[in-house]
Every structure is written in C-alpha cells, then in structure tokens.
C-alpha cells in the first residue's frame, strides 16, 4: 500500500508543473492555481485509479473540473470589478520568489490576455484553455462541461475570436483565409518544404482526433501521414504534410474556410485552420464519423 502511494506521489510530481500551468491559465492566480493542484492531489488519494491508463490526462481533467467550479463560483459572486481583479493579477504575478513559478509565469499568458479570459464564460474559458493551449481533444473536454463535442467546439471558437479581436488580430476575412489555405495545400501536394514553412507560424500546432491518429497508423503502408494527437512546430507539421493532400479540397466547415479529404467524393476528414497575421497558427484534424455527420462541409469552386 505504501509503495503504491509512493508511486502515485512520484507520478503526481512529474505532472505538477503541467497541472499548475493548466490551473494558472484557467484561474489567473498562482494562489488559486496551487489550491486547485492540491485539491487534485487530495482527490487522487481518495480515488481508485487502478484502471486509469493515462494518469496525466486524468489529473488534467480533475484540475479542470476544480477550476471550472471555482470560475463558476467567482462568476456568481462578481463583487469585484475587472479593474480590481487586474490589480490583483498583477500583484500576484510579481509576488513570488519561487523560480519554478516565475518560469511558469514567463511562459504563461500575459496580463492583457488574462483580462480577456475573464470576460469569457467559465465553459468558454475552459474550452479555449484546454483545447487551444494544451491540445486536449474536444471529446475529452465535453464531459467536463456537460456539453457535446460539437458544442464545446463552438465554445472554443467563440472564445478564440474574442481573444483574437482583443489582441488586434481579428480572424482574417474569407478570401484572405482561402488564399492561405490554398497556398498550404499547393505546397503540400508539390512537396515544396520551403513553401510550406512560409505559410506556417513557427509555433504552429497540428491536433488530430483519436480516429485520425488510428487511421494514420493503419494506413501507414499506403503513404498516409503519420499522426500523433499533437505535433508542434513548423518543421514537424511541414514534414507531416509534405507530398500529401492530393485528395484534399478547399471547403467551408460550418461556414469557415478549411480543407477536407474527400477521396471518391466521400468526406473522410476535415482540417480547420487558425490563421494569425497571414500564417497558419493551428490545424485541427477531425475524422470521427459521428462528428463529421454533424459538420456542414461545402466544397468551394474555382480550384
């Protein structure tokens, strides 16, 4: 029993920095983040995790639930003004002498973004933070907020637009976004590595759902791209798409410009793009048949 407790403690410490990062981005307070992480440790001690295959993912979910409860409680009180809360955030960010915490803050969100996040609903904030900042799939976020994956996707999309607009980088218009997507697909088909890099943000992330990852493994011998749940960095994403996308078409995905893999006229996967300053900052690949059936895909002409 003691050996198992020690093993859990070691695994928890391995995940502590990640859990604090999640909690801080959710709550904007190092003190509350520490409290949320401590609560996750207490719940770990009270839970039977013998059947848990991914303890890090389980802990992330627990921290997210704790943070969501705190955000909802904070939202219901709302006795503090946003200006007062910003002052508290600023004081909180400079009050620690812990080097690890300071490193976390340096790699975290800025005060301006924290203010924007404060304007989101708790569910929107959780969806945006977990998906856009930590590449947690929508189908794993859905049970936390009690919504469907499609609804969670919409929550994250609304939050993303608000963040982009607040930063002075609104989502590009449809024509501009289509030009970037077309350039990306052309470079992919032609195997032009440098051209691919030119349309990708250096910190781009490619996120794939579990069905797409599994498809890539079963079709690896047929020249399909090798996927992981998340691939980060322009070089890695460029190599993943290099020489591929031959069956991809430019489409509207629920009204937003994206791409779809349509072999034989059947939509097998869709690619949603987040574009900032004319470069692709994120690509979300979805191949789950159930989710595809609830997604409106319209092929654009003129290709």
Image (tube, rainbow, N blue to C red):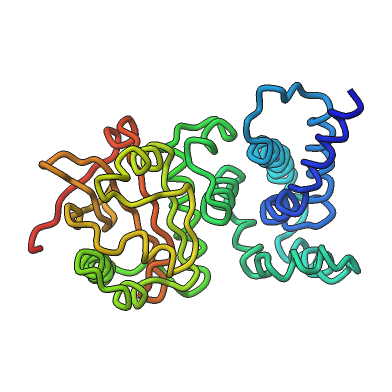
Question: Hey, which residue is sitting farthest left in the picture?
Answer: 302
Q: Residue at x 40, y 76 (%)?
A: 277
For the N terminus, the image quarter is: top right
For the C terminus, the image quarter is: bottom left
Given residues 57 and 35, the one toward you in this image is: 57
Q: x, y (%) of residue 123?
A: 57, 42
Given residues 214 and 204, the one toward you in this image is: 214
261 lies left or right of 28: left
Q: Residue at x 48, y 46 (%)?
A: 155
226 lies left or right of 263: right
Q: Quadrant of residue 302?
A: bottom left
Q: How many marks?
A: 0
Rendered position, 187 above or below 222: below
Question: Hey, which residue is sitting farthest front in the picture?
Answer: 221
Rendered position, 6 above or below 78: above
Q: Quadrant of residue 222?
A: top left
Q: Residue at x 53, y 51 (%)?
A: 135
Q: x, y (%) of residue 218?
A: 33, 37
Q: x, y (%) of residue 168?
A: 48, 75
65 lies left or right of 126: right
Q: Residue at x 91, y 69 (%)?
A: 97
Given residues 170 and 47, the one toward you in this image is: 47
Q: Quadrant of residue 240?
A: bottom left
Q: x, y (%) of residue 213?
A: 40, 42
Rendered position, 265 above or below 45: below
């Amino acid at each position: 029993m003691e050996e198992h407790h020690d093993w859990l403690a070691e695994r928890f410490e391995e995940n502590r920095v990640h859990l604090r990062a999640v909690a801080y981005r959710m709550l904007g307070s190092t003190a509350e983040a520490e409290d949320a992480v401590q609560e996750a440790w207490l719940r770990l001690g009270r839970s039977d995790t013998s059947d848990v295959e991914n303890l890090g993912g389980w802990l992330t979910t627990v921290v997210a639930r704790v943070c969501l409860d705190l955000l909802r409680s904070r939202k219901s009180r709302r006795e503090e003004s946003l200006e007062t809360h910003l002052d508290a955030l600023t004081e909180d960010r400079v009050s620690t002498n812990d080097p690890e915490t300071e490193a976390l803050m340096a790699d975290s969100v800025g005060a301006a973004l924290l203010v924007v996040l404060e304007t989101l609903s708790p569910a929107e904030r959780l969806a945006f933070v977990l998906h856009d900042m930590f590449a947690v799939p929508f189908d794993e976020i859905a049970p936390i907020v009690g919504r469907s994956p499609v609804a969670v996707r919409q929550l994250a999309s609304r939050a993303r637009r608000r963040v982009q607009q607040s930063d002075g980088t609104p989502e590009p218009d449809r024509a501009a976004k289509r030009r970037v997507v077309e350039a990306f697909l052309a470079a992919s088909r032609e195997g032009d590595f440098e051209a691919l890099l030119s349309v990708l943000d250096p910190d781009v992330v490619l996120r794939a759902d579990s069905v797409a990852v599994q498809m890539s493994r079963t079709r690896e011998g047929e020249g399909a791209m090798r996927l992981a749940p998340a691939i980060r960095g322009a070089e890695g994403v460029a190599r993943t798409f290099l020489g591929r996308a031959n069956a991809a078409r430019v489409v509207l995905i629920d009204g937003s410009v994206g791409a779809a893999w349509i072999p034989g006229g059947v939509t097998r996967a869709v690619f949603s793009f987040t574009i900032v300053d004319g470069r692709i900052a994120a690509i979300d690949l979805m191949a789950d048949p159930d989710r595809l059936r609830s997604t409106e895909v319209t092929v654009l002409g003129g290709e």
